[in-house]
Amino acid sequence: MVKKTAFEVLSLGAGVQSSCLALMAARGEVEPMPKCAVFSDTGAEPEKVYDYLSWLTDELPFPVHVVQHKSGLTANMEDAINNDVRMAQPPLFTKNPDGSHGQIPRVCTVEYKINPIRKLTRKLLGLKPRQRHKDEHCIQWIGISLDEIQRMRESTVPYITNRFPLVEKRMRRGDCFEWMKRNGYPEPPRSACVYCPYHSDHEWRRIKKTDPEGWKEAVRVDELVRDGWKNMDSKMYLHAARIPLKDVDLSSDVDRGQLTMLDECTGMCGN
């Protein structure tokens, strides 16, 4: 049975790929025009992301809906720690009393990113809470590029079908940068929670050097989660070194005075 398509919606993260996709749709380079875009706000993005989202919203000919689970990840985490309420935790690194190490499974993405978009989608489809869908259906555009093809997934709910227009157009992340530059659009900032435990040292270093407020917040959250939730014996950390974030050595090889291949090159390699 062919599903009736009610509309198409763009899942907007305000990063490079989804922003490029939104602007391509605005210029008619990807069709049909989405009914709307949806930005799922964790409440923990860098300020530059919110500033960019405001600019992007003004550029697009279709509306951008901003949705959020409860009061956001940070506030929910504070409430869970202080008042012993449930929350979907980020993938914190753990140090156990016996000296062993571990990592909490990531649950935050589903609760703070995916579910709020699904909730709005159901509302736009006219579905009430817990109401089963019949012919109601939408196509959800996701900004995964060709170099991230391993991240492609089918929707786990029957009223949404995922579509990956950048993969269809064989565009990689670098192609998105070039398209935006070629069309005179500003480069989007990196979109991710400022204190995400999945940050590489390169990303932590970038935040520390270029986003003082973001770094300050990450250090604060790292201290906040140290003793975890009620009845937890493990110590919690944002960094895989399992020491306080403010004490992690984030210096690069160049910062430490080590030579790079370019430093040692005699200039003959390409001759």
Image: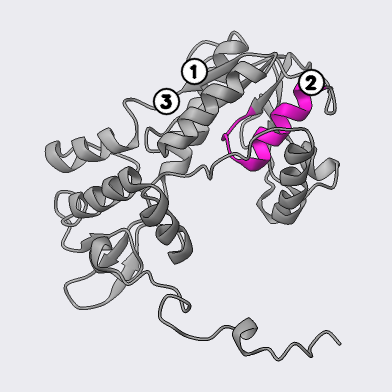
Q: Kindly identify which numbered label has been placed on residue 130.
A: 1
The residue sitting at 34% across, 25% down in the picture is: 70
At x 39% / y 56%, what residue is drawn? 209
Q: In front here: 247 or 168?
A: 247
Specify which label sits upstream in the sequence, 2 or 1.
Answer: 2
Question: Is 175 above or below relative to 234?
Answer: above
Q: What residue type is labelled 2?
A: Lys
Residue nearest the viewer, comparing 64 with 122: 64
Which stretch appears magenta? 11-27
Q: Which amino acid does label 1 sit on?
A: Arg
Q: Name the residue under label 3.
A: 68
Q: Position of residue 262 (x, y in %)?
A: 64, 82
The amino acid beneath tag 3 is Gln
Mark 1 or mark 3: whose residue is earlier in sequence: 3
Could you tell me which residue is drawn at 68 percent across and 88 percent down? 265
For residue 234, side relative to residue 24 (left or right) = left
